[in-house]
Amino acid sequence: MRRPGRWHRWLYRGGRPNRVARAMNRAWAVVHSSGLVGRLVTLEVAGRRTGRVISFPLVAADYEGERYLVAMVGQNANWVLNVRAAGGRAVLRHGRRRHVRLEEVAPALRAPILRRYLALAPGG
């Protein structure tokens, strides 16, 4: 895995986004939520500690007629832990808000979904 460059370290000094990173993240959240780009979505889920709704910009991979969200950093990604704590209940924004119930895919079935995600996700 590549180490983050100087720019990334500056944006996320101390593990938290600075003012510039927060502005960039908000801009990307608008793009993801707008529905203008087919595979970009925003996931809204209650935080597992605070209960406050948190938004995560993600890429939805389509495979065999279904849409999948992939956590590239693994099962300990914040959005995955939040969705688990919420019992799978979340909201997907892609032009409009849609209440969804997310389910985990069995590890044996993940390979073709991951290949599709890597083909679609920028920087995946």
Image (cartoon, grey):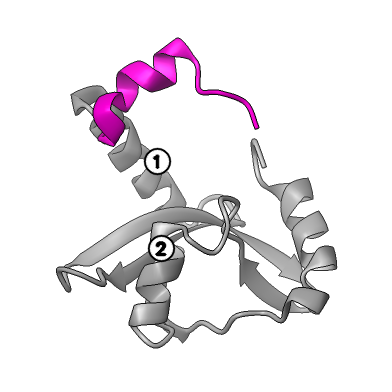
Question: Where does the N terminus fall, quadrant-wise?
Answer: top right
Q: Is residue 4 above or below residue 82?
A: above
Callout 1, which amino acid?
Trp
Disc on res. 79:
2
- Taking the image as shown, residue 49 lies to the left or right of residue 42, namely left
- Taking the image as shown, residue 110 lies to the left or right of residue 45, namely right
The CA distance from mark 1 to mark 2 is 17 Å
Q: Position of residue 16 (x, y in %)?
A: 25, 35
Q: Position of residue 114 (x, y in %)?
A: 76, 59
Q: Which residues are magenta?
A: 1-17
Q: Quadrant of residue 56?
A: bottom left
Q: Is residue 108 above or below residue 2?
A: below
Q: Quadrant of residue 97?
A: bottom left
Q: Is residue 30 above or below residue 24?
A: below
Q: Categorize mark 1 by other alpha carbons within 10 Å: few (<14), some (14-19), many (20+).
A: some
Q: Is residue 10 magenta?
A: yes
Q: Position of residue 116 (x, y in %)?
A: 79, 58
Which residue is located at x 32 percent, y 16 percent? 10
Q: Is residue 26 magenta?
A: no
Provide the secondary structure element on which disc 1 rests: helix
The answer, for residue 96, to whether it is visible in the render is: no
Q: Foreground residue, 76 or 86? A: 76
Q: Categorize mark 2 by other alpha carbons within 10 Å: few (<14), some (14-19), many (20+).
A: many
Q: Foreground residue, 98 or 18? A: 18
Q: Which residue is mark 1?
A: 28
Which residue is located at x 62 percent, y 26 percent? 2
Question: Where does the C terminus fall, quadrant-wise?
Answer: top right
Callout 2, which amino acid?
Trp
Which residue is located at x 64 percent, y 36 percent? 123
The answer, for residue 86, to whether it is visible in the render is: yes
Count of numbered circles in the view = 2
Q: Position of residue 78 (x, y in %)?
A: 39, 59
